[in-house]
Image (tube, grey):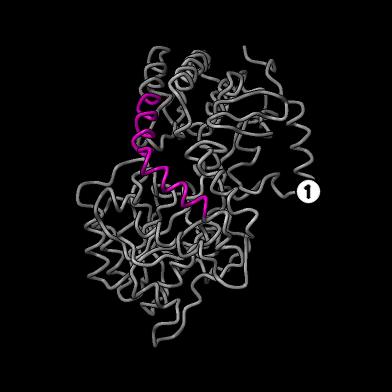
Amino acid sequence: MDTNEFELPRSRTANERLHAMVPGGAHTYAKGDDQYPENLAPVISHGRGAHVWDVDGNRYIEYGSGLRSVSLGHAHPRVIEAVRRELDRGSNFVRPSVVEVDAAERFLATVPTAEMVKFAKNGSDATTAAVRLARAATGRPRVAVCADHPFFSVDDWFIGTTPMSAGIPAATTDLTVSFPYGDLAATEALLSRHEGEIACLILEPATHTEPPPGYLAGLRELADRHGCVLVFDEMITGFRWSEAGAQGLYGVVPDLSTFGKALGNGFAVSALAGRRDLMERGGLRHTGDRVFLLSTTHGAETHSLAAAMAVQTTYVEEGVTARLHALGERLAAGVRDAAASMGVGDHVLVRGRASNLVFATLDENRQPSQQYRTLFLRRLLAGGVLAPSFVVSSALDDADIDHTVDVVAQACAVYRKALDAADPTPWLAGRPVKPVFRRLA
C-alpha cells in the first residue's frame, strides 16, 4: 500500500515560503500545489528539453510544459540564440523597434488568414482586446462565450461567469452569455433570443474533440447573418493544430483571433490578429471613434518577439506540428494499452487531439474523481513523470514516451487495487487534489 516512500522535503519548504509571500503559492492558479498530491508538489530548479529537475534533485519527464507554452522543450537552442542576439541591443525603447516590423511580417506570413496583428504579453490582454473591439465595432454590449471551454481571460467579463466570481459586479457578469460547443441550433437560438445585443461569439475552434463536420463554417455563417464578430481563441490550438492554428487547418476564417502560449516557447508574448477594418479601429488610419485596443509597456519587448520569430521558423522548417502529433499518438496508444492490460481501461482515459492530450480518472462508478486523480498523480511523480496532462513537447523522444508508459502501467496496477477496494483513500496519503475553479479555498 502506498505511504510516503516518495518525499520532497526541499520542495515542501519552498512551497511554504511561497505561500507566506505569494497568494496561492504560485503566480498561476493551475500551477498551485492544490493541483498536486499533498506534499508532492515539486518546485522546479531548471529544465532542459523535455526534462525538469526539482529542488530536491529529482528529474522528471515533463508534460504540459509551462501550461502548454513550451512546445519545443525548455531552453531550445534556436529560441535561446535568437533571444541572446537581442539582449545586449536593448529590450524596450520610446519608439517601435525594427524587431516589431520583422515580427509582424513573420506572424502574418505564418497566419495568412489575418491581415493585421498586435502583440501583448499574455492571453487575457488579447482576448479582452478582442471583446472590446467587437463591442466597439457592433455597438452591442453582450459577449457570448463557449460554455464547454474552461478559460478565456482573467478579466471580469469572463471570470464573473466562474465559481471564483468574488469582487465582480453582477451587472458585468450579466452581459456574458454562453453557448454549447458543436450545437449550431442552440447558438442560433441564443443569437435570436438576444437579437441585436451580442457583439461576438468567442470560442476555442477545437479542443478535446474535433469540431463536428460543418460546425465552424456554420458558426461563421451565423455570425455573419446576425451581425456579430467571430473570435477564435487560438491560445492552445495555435501551432499545435498547425502553424496557422485551427483556422489554418480547418479553413474557416474568423474576424479576430488570439494567439499565445506556444508562440514564445516560454517567453511572454501573445497576439491579437484579424481583419484590417476591425483592427484598424485601434489605430490611426480611420475616421471613427478610437478604440483603446492594446497599449502595453512591455508588449513589444524585443527578445520575446525574437523568440516568437524563432519559434515560427523552427515549426515550419522542422515540421514540429507533425512531430507533436506523432509523439502524442505513440503516447496515447501506450497509455491506453497499459490501462487495458491492468484492467482499468474504462477508468484511465486519454482524450484529445494527439498534440494536446489530457487524461481522465474515473471511479468505480465511472464518474470523474479527484481522489483517483490524486492516486494516479502520486504514482506518476514517484516514477519521475510530471504530468498534470499528457500534452507533449517536441523535445520528447521515444525513450521518454516508453518510460512514461511503463510508469503509467505501474500506476494503473495500484489504481486497480483501489477500484477493487472501492476506496482509493489508503493510497492518497493526504487530501485529494482540487479543481482550479471553486468558490472556497
Q: What SS does tag 1 mark?
A: helix
Which residue has dot 1 on it? 21
Which residue shows up at 48% across the image and 31% down it? 395
Amino acid type indicated by mark 1? Met
Secondary structure character of the magenta stretch overall: helix
Residue 365 in the image: x percent, y percent? Answer: 43, 26
Please state the extent of the stretch shown in magenta in the rendering.
306-332
Near-viewer residue (331 or 215): 331
Question: Residue at the location (52% across, 53% down)?
Answer: 306
Q: Tell me residue 276's x, y (percent).
A: 34, 72
Magenta run includes residue 323: yes
Q: As displayed, is residue 353 above or below residue 142?
A: above
Q: Nearer the viewer, residue 282 or 429?
A: 282
Name the residue rendered at 60%, 50% in the picture: 439
Report whether residue 333 is seen. yes
Whether 151 is drawn above or below 51: the answer is below
Q: Residues within 10 Å of mark 1 (few under 14, many from 20)?
A: few
